[in-house]
Image (cartoon, grey):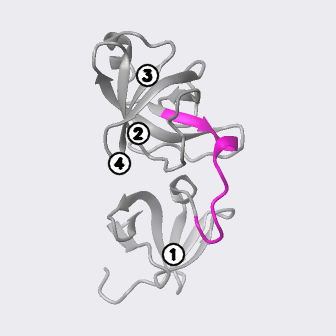
Amino acid sequence: MPDSPSRPGSSDELIAVGRVLGPHGRHGAVKIKAISDVAGRFDPGNRLSLSKDGATPQGPAHEITESQHASNEEVILYFDDIRRRDMAQGLTGLWLCVPVSEVPDAGEGEYFHYQLIGLKVRTTDGEELGELTEILETGSNDVYVVAGQDGDLLVPALSKVVMEVDVENGHMVVDLPEGLR
């Protein structure tokens, strides 16, 4: 199973908003790690699709009947059609997704993580560094993991470092601080 969901290519595709960590209790609830901060995303009445790759649905969407926040990132969800622990256990590791059309627009100069994963990263001098493969949330600022020929490079997501983000053309330009490599 992939460590991060696939990057969407059209508005018909899905966006991962969480990942099933495992069953919770005996009545079919699942504990999930939320990767969406959209208010109300996991409220009762909303529908989520399950996916192995974070982009392709595995059957019909499931309606949330109850949700409880376990922590800032973890939520307990009950679905209308999952009633037993063994059913919930079978969902472990799957992505919870919504259609791209349900993702709100990011603000000016802001991007969702799914838009950045997969971007080719190069320096202001034109040196190809690799591909942005992961985003670490550190609390103070995100850190972009760029996988290149010489291994992973950790790039702070700061305006003085990230000079350009071009989601449409699939690249990011960075001005690496002295000593970062």
Query: Which structural element holds mark 2?
Result: loop
The three-letter amino acid code for the residue at tag 1 is Arg
Q: Quadrant of residue 165?
A: bottom right
Q: Position of residue 4 (x, y in %)?
A: 43, 45
Q: For the residues marked 1 and 3, what is the alpha-carbon distance in whole angstroms? A: 44 Å
Asked whether the viewer can see residue 148, the reply is no
The three-letter amino acid code for the residue at tag 3 is Tyr
Q: Which residue has dot 3 on it?
A: 78
Q: Which residue has dot 4 on it?
A: 72
Query: Which structural element holds mark 4?
Result: loop
Q: Which residue has dot 2 on it?
A: 2
Query: Which structural element holds mark 1?
Result: strand
Marks 1 and 4: which is nearer the front?
Answer: 4
- Looking at the image, is mark 1 or mark 4 earlier in the sequence? 4
Q: Position of residue 70 (x, y in %)?
A: 31, 38
Q: Which residue has dot 1 on it?
A: 122
The structure residue drawn at horizontal position 45% and vertical position 78%, both measured from the top left corner, is 158
The structure residue drawn at horizontal position 72% and vertical position 43%, both measured from the top left corner, is 11
Q: For the residues marked 2 and 3, what is the alpha-carbon distance in whole angstroms? A: 25 Å
